[in-house]
Image (cartoon, coloured by chain):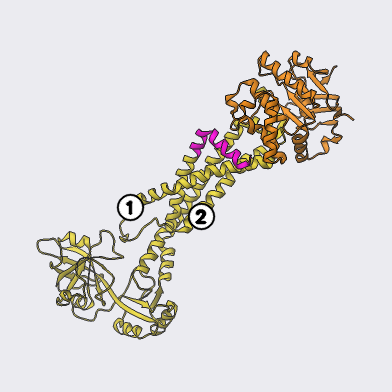
Chain colours: A orange, B yellow
Amino acid sequence: MPLVDARDVSRVFPMPAGPVVALRNVSLAVDAGEYVAITGPSGCGKSTLLHLVGCVDTPSSGSLLFDRRDIARLSEAERGRLRLTRIGFVFQRFFLLPMLSAAENVELPQAEAGASAGERRARTLELLEYVGLADRADHLPSQLSGGEMQRVAVARALANRPALLVADEPTGELDDETGEQVAALFDRVNASGTAVLVVTHNPALAARASRRLAMKSGRLVE
Amino acid sequence: MTSFALAWRTARRYRARTLLAITGVAVIGALLFDMLLLSRGLLLSFADLLHSSGFDIRVVSTEGLAARLPISGSVRLAEDIRQLPDVEHVLMIRIEPATVRAAGQSPRGISLIGSSDAEQSWRIVQGSALGSPAAVAEACPVLVTRPLAAAFSLRPGSALSINVRPPGVASALPAVDCRVVGVAEFAFAQIDELTAVTTLEAFQRAMGGGAADADLVLVTSKPGAPPGRAIAAIARLRPDLRVYSNEDVVAQFNRNGFAYFRQISLVLSSLTMVFAFLLVATLLTVSINQRLGEIAALRALGIGRPRIAAMLLWESVLLVGAGGLLALPIGEALALVLDRILRQMPGIPERMHFFVFEPRALAIHLTLLAVTAATAAAYPVWLTARLPIAETLRREVLG
């Protein structure tokens, strides 16, 4: 049974000028430990699919199972708990809390999950070492470069040992060199057994995935 | 990382916004605090003044204490009251307008008080009391207020002539020669009031030598005896008279002379509450709108609504709490200035104050600010609770 099992999933956004169909009958399965990249032009529905797989949204039709659980049947609180414990998010704009240090940003999801202070400290140190930023633990996001911020964001996403890491244009705000560092980090994450689903315009990043999919006009075309 | 710690860090991170909010709440809170002090200040001050006079019962012939008529048979009444088991002390007072003349000075209108007790509670600031040996030797010894002393350059030993002029009576009472034995402060005297007090005997002579009934009888209950018993006994002695406890007098004052201040302070307190609410709610809402991406990301990471709501509530509490505490010394300083200005109003006794601190005002101030903090946070909390995560993240990236 795949970790993510989406069947005939559609997502329609009601708009004043009429409904907009962002996804049309998309079926996608992501196995545990798999690395999937989705590419396609802007507005083709990549991020919408990622948000559905990441359980921050629910499909308008079709079925989406995560860990065999039907996302549409879960309450908002249950989906929140699922995201907290089973899914890690990496965003294009990092979205680190600017008033917290790198370490505190990584600790926050662990605190929400109920980890003890000792567990949090140990896991945070381990993760910052993993992303190569142990020496920047006490730095605020404003004191970090874009690449460093994204690496902290990856550490934060991994904080609760998720089964799936979803990343929306993770190199979109980075130059080639730092983008390459983040891409290499994703390889390591996947190699340690975490499934990765990445949406990107970056061909170099997509090329690292074990499976590459393309989208066009709300449909998976490959 | 607790919600409070997140709120604290946010407040420190956005310092300009935090300072703006705290300053705004401090100023508004100071006004609120002053309105609360004003809402009961005059009443408390008046009650304090009544209690400090040492009398707890007042007997008059008319409804209320403002306009008084002489009490017929007041001397006999005073004697009867003195015999009551719960009564310790009785004082008769008569007040009439009079004209004062002194050598080389133009005549001036004053209030002349006749008192049956020479040792009563005027505070002597110069010279001696009416019961002193020097005063007893005088046919018409008088104590004068400082404004009267200043107006006629009077000091102990000065001579003056007093001519009583009862209102509404066409009289040609002879002037009485008196001598100043002391300068005193009168509890109920207005700041610029020209008042003189003399013995009831001298007052009667000034009234033409006939019996001058008192228009106010003041009674002190025995320690431990509830004034209600003495009041009931006096009412039985003279059912035609009105007998008031201090609490009755304060209640009358509250009903008649004080409603104006209470209403003003209620309206202004409500307005300041609304301003504080609008200020904090607006700042928090603007702040939330600037952080929608952050908040949507936190929600995407699985940070629950309760933690985010608690963080916003704590932010509001920090802003309103800090501003509210700062409001107390500002409000106190402002109250001193406003009190000084308001006490210049005509007809206000010198020892009355408009702004009087009481713990109740502090408790209400803190409660109202707590309510303001909670309600100001309500809208931003509601905004974040119903924030569509996916749509917000998409908008943030497109933006």
Q: Residue at x 35, y 83 (%)?
A: B81
Label the magenta part by its dominant secondary structure: helix
Q: Secondary structure at mark 1?
A: helix
Query: Is residue B217 rendered to the left or right of residue A146?
Result: left
Within-10-Å neighbours for mark 1: few <14, some 14–19, many 20+:
some
- In three-dimensional space, the C-alpha distance between marks 1 and 2, rounded to whole angstroms, equals 24 Å
- The amino acid type of the residue labelled 2 equals Ile
Spot occupied by residue A15 in the image (x, y as percentages of width and height): 73, 28
Mark number for residue B364? Answer: 2
Spot occupied by residue A112 in the image (x, y as percentages of width and height): 70, 39
Mark positioned earlier in the residue sequence (1 or 2): 1
Q: Is residue B341 magenta?
A: no
- Image quarter in which the C terminus of chain B is found: top right
Magenta part of the chain = B1-21
Within-10-Å neighbours for mark 2: few <14, some 14–19, many 20+:
some
Residue situated in front as seen by the camera: A32 or B102: A32
- The amino acid type of the residue labelled 1 equals Arg
Against A177, residue A89 (above or below) is below
